[in-house]
Structure formats: C-alpha cells, structure tokens
Amino acid sequence: MILEALEQWVARPLKRAAQTAWQRQRLRRAMRRLLALPMGVAPERPLLAELRAAWGNDRCAADLDFLSEVARLAAVTLGPVLECGSGLTTLLLGALAGRRGVEVWALEHEPEWRRRVAAALRDHKAGQVYLWFSPLSDYGEFVWYAAPLPLMPDAFRLVVCDGPPAGTRGGRVGLLSLIGDRLPAGAVILLDDAAGDTEQHTLRRWMRDAPLVVALRQLPHGTLAELTRC
Ligand SMILES: C[S@@+](CC[C@H](N)C(=O)[O-])C[C@H]1O[C@@H](n2cnc3c(N)ncnc32)[C@H](O)[C@@H]1O
C-alpha cells in the first residue's frame, strides 16, 4: 500500500519531470544543429527525425516525408509563407524561412497549443514567425480560421496546409476561398494527408475553383499533394 502510494505520488511525477527535461534538452540540441545550417540549406532526414522525436507529439506532428518537403521548400522560398495548423512545421519554417527575412504567418486555433508553439519559437530563437491565434469561424459552407486578412501579405509563395484538424466542417476547403486571391502564379500549396475523403473533396473543389497543377506523391505513411498555381 505504502509502496504503491510512493510510486503514484513521488516516483511517477519525478520520472515524468526527468523525461520532460531530457526531451527539452534533446530538442535544444537538434534545434541548434538546424540553426547552424547555412542559409538556404535544408536539413537532411536524420536531423528531421531527431527534431520530430525531440518535439514529442507523435500523434499529431507531420510525418517525416511531409517535414522533408516543408523543409526543402522553406529553405529556398523567396516570398511570404502561410501555415495553417502550427507545431514542429512552424519551428522549421521559422528557422529556414523566417531567419532569412522571409515573412512567415502561422494560423493556430487552439490557445494552449499556440502558447506551446510560441514558447518553443522563442526558446530556440527559431526566427520570426507571426503565430496568430485564429479561432475557427463559421463561413457558412465551411469552417476555417478567422485569419487577420487585412494584416496579412498580399501574396504568399508557399502554403503549408496542415489544419484545421480532421472533423472540421468543410475540411481545409476554406483556404482557397479566403486566400486564393493571394496566391500568384508559381505559388505552392503543400497539403498533408491528401488521400482522405475530406482532402479528396478539398482537392476536387480547389481544382474546380482555381488553375492548379496537382502532383500527388504516395508515401509510406500517406499521400502528399503539392499544388502549384498556374
Ligand atoms: C495536424 S496538427 C498540425 C501539426 C503541425 N503542422 C506539426 O507539424 O506539428 C493540426 C492541429 O492540431 C492541434 N494539435 C496538434 N497537436 C496537438 C496537441 N498535442 N495537443 C493539442 N492540440 C494539438 C493544433 O491545433 C494544430 O493546429
């Protein structure tokens, strides 16, 4: 009985605190390596895998293939970047685009999650990101972020579409309705989990509404869609 109580009230919280500290240290080391890369150079997969493991959000963080693609484009993009759904991808965008002086805007609807991501950006000096609290809002046909449109750039060159989360009415369809006129020719949208029913519906709608070239890549953990505005 006493041993059980000790385990519950002392050992377990201590173990959890030690794990958290170790994880934080691991992320610090991985972020240092990321920030040490020359400008314009994307991290290799082993470093991305280390960042992902250290970030420790297995359930929701983007998988390695998506992270690789985000990193590859973020390292070289010349214009503003928009991200929908923040997390590890936001750290990457800050480090690889924000640090080069490219404007990065990230929309996040969960206040607690936004706080965690903002703290990580600050702690690791990841580069300038406008991480905007944008509650999900009802636009009639779909639900999407209440984005601060008047403050945002007139044109985005890269969009990382990893939100709103599954189950949101209309899925991610709202992106093009609200931001479509800010995507010039050549702008790229990266859409994660593109094989799901909702995402397939989104892709069909987007292709109907805008001139887009769609490249689908079958990956071990899902399908990645890369859409280029014509
Ligand atoms: C697919 S996730 C975005 C993942 C992000 N792009 C990344 O690579 O880490 C979509 C949304 O899920 C929510 N989310 C992700 N992880 C969460 C967590 N551990 N706790 C609460 N909300 C979470 C956030 O609101 C986030 O914007």
Image: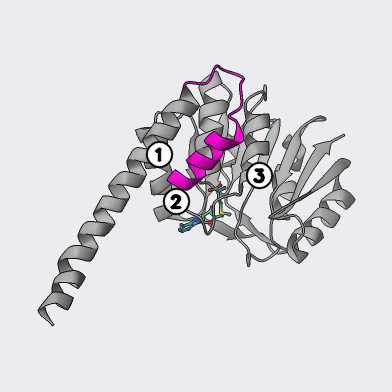
Compare residues 175 and 29 and report the one nearer the observer: 29
Residue 205 placement: quadrant: bottom right
Q: In the image, what residue type sits under mark 1?
A: Leu
Let me know if residue 127 appears in the view.
no
Q: Is residue 142 left or right of residue 124?
A: right
For the residues bearing labels 3 and 2, Cβ distance under 8 angstroms: no
Mark 3: C-beta under 8 Å from nearest atom of ligand 1: yes
Q: Residue at x 49, y 40 (%)?
A: 50
Q: Secondary structure at mark 1?
A: helix
**Label 3 Cα crowd, 10 Å radius (few <14 / some 14-19 / many 20+):** many
Q: Position of residue 88 (x, y in %)?
A: 51, 43
Q: In the image, what residue type sits under mark 3?
A: Phe
Q: Position of residue 160 (x, y in %)?
A: 65, 42
Distance between the alpha carbons at the discs numbered 3 and 1: 19 Å
Q: Residue at x 57, y 51 (%)?
A: 146
Q: Earlier in the sequence, mark 1 or mark 2?
A: 1
Let me know if residue 181 appears in the view.
yes
Q: Is residue 217 left or right of residue 124?
A: right
Q: Residue under circle 3?
A: 66
Residue 27 disc label: 1
Task: State the quadrant of the N terminus.
Answer: bottom left
